[in-house]
Amino acid sequence: MQISFTLNGRPTSVDVAPSMLVTELLREHLNLTGTHIGCDTSQCGACVVHLNGAPVKSCTLLAPALDGATLLTIEGLQGAPGSNRLHPMQEAFRENHGLQCGFCTPGMVMTAVALAQDKGVLTEAEVRHGLEGNICRCTGYQNIVVSVMAGAAAMHAANAGE
Amino acid sequence: MGDVIGIGAAPKRKEDQRFLTGRGNYVSDIKRAGMTAGVFIRSPHAHAVLRGIDKSAALAAPGVIAVLTGDDVAADGLGSLPCGWGISDAKGVPMKEPPFPMLAQGKVRFVGDLVAFVVAETVEQANVAAELVEVDYEVLSSVVGVLDAVRPGAPQLFDDVPSNICCDWELGDKAAVETAFQKAAHVAKLSLTNNRLIGNPMEPRAAIAEYEPGTDRYTLWSTSQFPHVVRFLMGALVLKIPQHKLRVVAPDVGGGFGVKQFHYGEEAVITWAAKRVMRPIKWVASRSEGYVSDRHGRDHVTEAELALDENGKFLALRVKTLANMGGYLSTFGPNIPTNLYGPLLGGVYTTPAIYCNVKVVFTNTVPVDAYRGAGRPEATFVVERIVDVAASEMGIDRVELRRRNMIPKEAYPYQTPVLVQYDSGDPVGCLDGALVAGDVKNFGARKAASERKGKFRGLGFSTYVEACGLAPSRFAGRLGARGGLYESATVRVHPAGQVTVLIGTHNHGQGHETTFAQIVSDKLGVPFDNVDIVFGDTDRVQFGMGTYGSRSLVVGGAALSKAADKVIVKGKKIAAHLLEASEQDIQFEAGKFSVAGTDRIKTFEEIAGAAYVPHDYPLEVLEPGLEEQAYYDPVNFTYPGGCHIAEVEIDPETGTVTLVNYTAVDDVGTVINPMIVEGQLHGGIVQGVGQALYENAVYDETSGQLVSGSLMDYCMPRADHMPMMKVETHSTLCTHTPMGVKGCGEVGTIGSPAAVINAVVDALSHLGVTHVDMPATPNRIWRLIQNASVPIAAE
Amino acid sequence: MKAFAYHQPGQIPEAAKLLAAEPDSKLVAGGMTLIPTLKQRLASPPALIDLSKLPGLKGCTDNDATITIGAMTTHAEVAKSSLVRARIPALAALASQIGDPSVRNRGTICGSVANNDPAADYPAGVLGLAATIITNEREIAADNFFRGLFETALKPGEIITAVRFPVPLLAGYAKFKAPASRYALVGVFVAKFRDGVRVAVTGAGPGVFRVPPMEHALSQGFDPASIAAIRIDTDNLTSDIHAEADYRAHLVTVMAKRAVQAALSERPAS
């Protein structure tokens, strides 16, 4: 079936099998491999993307659900498309060593951005609770929590400045 | 073009840009032209005879290219998966080493054992075909626990391995220990289990293999911590592919923790199959597949006894352990519960006599091998638990008892009774630092506050040492290693002065691209931005043993340091020529070569340029180019250590243990990048906390099925399980590594389980609880409280 | 995943017709349970009937005595609904504890109720509040709806369109999360109405169930102390690697007490 949606700001139209998962569509057909697959039970969160502005697990989303929707993946998050500039949340992860092997990172960042958009400046407890659906095996979460708090504050400050 | 950023600084990581923007390059991200999909068929039974495999229906299914089984492996005369260590018992009798076929032959021995491989045009077609392969199993009774496996009449995995015992290993002076026990004023005893764990790197294992008929070369992309070792083990020993015809690439790898440091059957099968089908093949494991095939960790049952004199001085330690090996010997399997366990039983104490007996046992479970810490967390858990038991029984404060028995700083180097000699350390300093950092003096007030809320609060200590920087080849060889454990590095200086490092360790989260660049920037005085680190490709990097055992900085960094020194030596020759001075008069400092006592200077860039434009070179004494290589084989292990303090609160109504404070003061030697070291400690500690409170691989004793076979049932630590940890370093310098480094990758995982469980026991001590097995789940804690509450209530 | 046909009906009768024509096909709402099942090849329906394009199935409305939640309303929407938070805060709190943020953005009330997972949260809220499940054909009282492990009173071809909740005087939900899955190891929903108290338990057994002795005791005195001594029978409770039956029985009492406490200190869910 043919589906049309906005992918990282660009109109996209693709022919998909109804059984195709969004992870497969992104990774195998649209060459966007930043969205990762870390489990098969919708637990790990490495595949989190924003569907119509809300974080969802793209490994548990059928491609037809994208029809008419807006999808944002880690590749579309950057400060300036095509440049090396980072989004404030990405920058906060870099600044605070919020990643090690990098595999959970795209999902962590996408979840964190949504959390910050939803709640503004975040407390430690809100961050820890908000990351409930994202598993990291490397960092022990401490620097991720610090990163998300800093990134949320930076996003908040940037919005206030606008 | 950027600044020099040297040792001790904390630049942001070079690797982060690509990971943060979704532009990492993991194996599953790679596509090859004409690529096919591979799917493995795994045994659904723990123990069965393979009576036959009918692949005809699968072969007829749409898109199917090949279905391969153990018979095909045998027909091609291929080898089995080799074990890298050969240990022996006390009489020198070698361990039993049954073959580990890359696809099962005759029998399957664990749920997940590889039975067949299906190659098709698409993953879905391969999955459909896999369901059409008919495997005729004759199911046998199975055994999953070590205690059951050694009982008379237990199911036997191998005809020639009686009682399923692979090796009855021992270490230490048994007679001296017995004598000491006879003199003891007190003997503390403890029975414990060390729970089976599953490493769970977030990236599942994956592989792509390709064969190029034009050059007769194979390429394997694999999620490996040690591509060169895979090339050797798989090429030379399993598939009989000449080394120069096999390229192994481990690109970005999403975490390893030991799980990815073994040579797996999947790698061998897919590489072999790629030539048979003459197409590239890709296989990506699902998480569920990983649970039943990634090598597991730990799984010990232990009885320990500590003999003390009337003042609490340790006289001797006796430890008997049954260690689960699973269904076959994995790459490092038998080394872990023996050589990486027994020699660490000395801890940071002056215990003069130690005896350790380990029965290494086969069971119908996934093979067990190294998982972060590997042997050393198990040893630390035994030592640090029994010290607490002894303190409690003798009425001596547990900090005081530790202090009385600690090796004083002045006593280093310190020879233990179990082979190893610690070169440096300051356990008392770490303990004192942690007591302050953990605000131990106000614990009483915090405990009282918890009690007012109806909660139990406990404090636990773990003062530990580990051996890492694997490893001195000579020493390892004596212990049974079948390979060397050195590392290699090449420093390639380009004509414009930038530097590429080719190193044999593998970066999968540890920040090598940053840390190693700091070492080069520091030593050569070149800008940090001008240094790139290349790893993970046997066609690019000369050789390497890979990353495990906290060895990358200790051994790889040392090789890099040596190679950089050689660049300086060569640079001095070039400078002497350009500056028309004697080589002995050339000094090198801060990126500049100068003639001593003069203002005649050549910058590093000028020397690099001259090295590649040898117009007037004295070619008889000076070669063009500026590229140096070094191999480094350590003279000893390194011995990081420290003191960890855990503070827990228990809700007696539900049995829930909450970790409320965690303090670590660790001695990791010289710190190259404090930001990265802290991150390694955080991650390591939480993996240890996971073992202590959450993680457990559970097999059904009847069916041999892995019950905790997904993230729904195997509890990984999450963000809301943890408090903010306080991590500090109290370093003494390693006396034998070039930069004084000791390694930091595993310390967190080694120190933390005992600290957490000691805190849990402390919180429950008023109920008479003296030991809690891991993981300290709510159900387990509730039951301990229930069982203890009855007599208390009756009083 | 095995291939299947895919339908996105625009009207409920059309959806019902599709379902009737192909009885083995599956309705998909948020897909949080169905899609993992398909991925693991544990089911291979010939067709999926996607409910997302059906009109009028989203959102929360109220009248004097009840709140009605449209079938396709997500957990996140219920958790954030000012209406639900104001009138049945315990239900908003329950929805805010399901899964994780990403799951809550896709998972729906009808999916959770129709699936009737023995450890799901919603069944406790639905049964505890004596809600009514509204389908395209009829209305079913919660007491008649849940029929044990993954079984409900839904007939083939029947589609949930909404769930109607009576507004209680007080209500509370207390969940003891299974540490790995985040499902309820034990979850207890307590609701006090003018004519009595209802206590519904999820996670502990093969399906959600009520606890009459606790309901009776709480009707006499709505206080945690009223039920502190009540122990439920372990006979029909689940034992697994996370919790043995007697521990689950104990947790039912503990969580029931905490649910009552939460009801008494009721405040909108955060």
Image (cartoon, coloured by chain):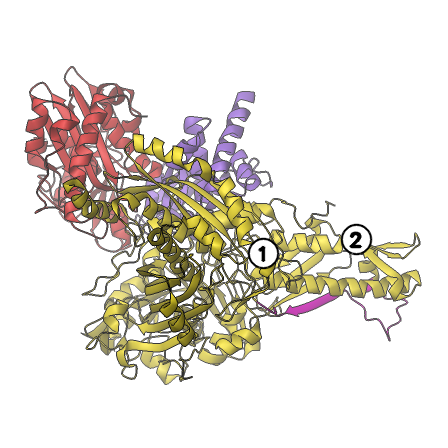
Query: Visible in this render: residue A51?
Result: no
Which amino acid does the dot numbered 1 rest on?
Lys
- Which residue is more in the foreground, B362 or A78? B362
The tint of chain A in the picture is purple
Q: Quadrant of residue B612?
A: bottom right
Residue B621 is a magenta residue: yes
Q: Quadrant of residue B38?
A: bottom left
What is the x, y in percent for residue A51? Answer: 38, 36
Are both tags, 1 and 2, on one chain? yes
Which of the two labelled residues, at mark 1 and mark 2, occupies the earlier sequence position? 1
Residue A22 is a magenta residue: no
**Residues shaded magenta:** B611-636
* Residue shown at the point (72%, 48%) measured from the top left: B4
Identify the main secondary structure in magenta: loop
Q: Which residue is mark 2?
A: B591
B738 sits to left or right of B466: right
What is the x, y in percent for residue B634? Answer: 61, 68
